[in-house]
Image (cartoon, rainbow, N blue to C red):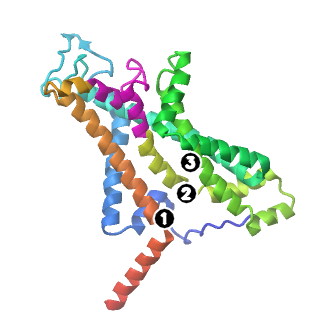
Amino acid sequence: MSTSIVSTPRAGKPLWQRLPIISHYRMSAGLQRGMLVAGLVLTCIFVLAAALAPLIAPYGHAQISDASGNFPTQAPPGGRFLWGTTVGGFDVFSRTLWGAQTAFAVIVIAVAFSIFLGVILGLVSGYLGGWLDRIMVVLADAIYAFPSLLLAIVMSIVISQGQSSLWGGVMAAAISITVVFIPQYFRVIRAETVRLKAEPFVESAKVVGASSGRIMFKHIFRNATRTLPLIFTLNASEALLTLAGLGFLGFGIEPTAASEWGFDLNRAMSDATSGIWWTGVFPGAAIVLTVLGLTLVGESMNDLADPRLRLRRKAKNRGGKATA
């Protein structure tokens, strides 16, 4: 028998109101709500651009010609090319939209892999303890000590030895970033598991003869992972910055495999000295606005998950009613 330590939702409350984003929006107020709404708007624009890129983008990510001939190089914004073209003849508007799809795919794959591995390793390490726990903690700390971008570069070099289309594209970048985030999820889940395994409901499960696997993945799992949505939103922005850094330094996705904002910024550096601003402004603005949106959502959810903030808000509301 297990007893969840998470508070039960109020009876009769609709399911849609219990979703993380909706519940945090209902708890927010004032500036906090404004930050959350702004972050949600920017994030939704990013997701829609990624999902609708095949429909909105007038050209392919590597297309430099059509039926009328080759595209002009470094053409200013306007006419056929809404945001101009690059020195290689690529349409900036199309490259930016396809870059949103690439960034979305890498973020989802990288964070999903890191959550899966980090949660399993954290549960096993925290519950079993002993020499296995000590070894895994040392390894996680050793990985966490490396700068995230440097670690991603090393992993990208190792993975690129295969030189296959799969490893040279989105999957290679996603796996490189996955290694960066595994220690973060491992440490969070391990700390929660160590705390929860001393709770009475875990002791009760042991008394009735539940196996270690059942206790870990049925009783402890749902209580230890309640903070994952917060970590996910915060890590999504870091994953995007890491991807852009890899692309800017030349260790990211192959140019022919997919469009990537960091790579486009690298190619736009030489244009800036010639007064050609459009090749770097639009992919750079896409990175800034997407990271800003994800960060605002993550920070707002993180603040609203603090019980002290909820208590202050309730006290404020009671004071307002009393005054009225």
Q: Is mark 3 on a helix, strand or loop?
A: helix
Mark 1 and 2 residues: CB-CB less than 8 Å, in contact? yes
Tell me the amino acid under the disc marked 2. Thr
The part of the chain drawn in magenta is 240-267
Q: Is residue 222 visible?
A: no
Residue 186 placement, left or right of 232: right
Residue tagged by mark 2?
227
Q: Which residue is drawn at 50% across and 26% down?
A: 156
Q: Which residue is drawn at 15% across and 21% down?
A: 75
Please provide percent x and percent y for residue 302. 46, 60
Mark 1 and 3 residues: CB-CB less than 8 Å, in contact? no
Q: Is mark 1 on a helix, strand or loop?
A: loop
Which secondary structure dominates the residues rendered in magenta? helix
Q: Is residue 7 visible?
A: yes
Q: Quadrant location of the C terminus?
A: bottom left
User: Sequence order check: which comes first, mark 2 or mark 3?
Assistant: 3
The residues bearing labels 2 and 3 have C-alpha atoms spaced at a distance of 12 Å
The residues bearing labels 1 and 3 have C-alpha atoms spaced at a distance of 19 Å
User: Sequence order check: which comes first, mark 1 or mark 3?
Assistant: 3
Residue tagged by mark 3?
184
**Image-quadrant location for residue 22:** bottom left
Residue tagged by mark 1?
305
- Comparing 194 with 270, the one in front is 270
Residue 308 placement, left or right of 224: left
* Position above or below: 256 against 182: above
* Position above or below: 216 against 113: below
Q: Is residue 301 magenta?
A: no
The residues bearing labels 1 and 2 have C-alpha atoms spaced at a distance of 9 Å
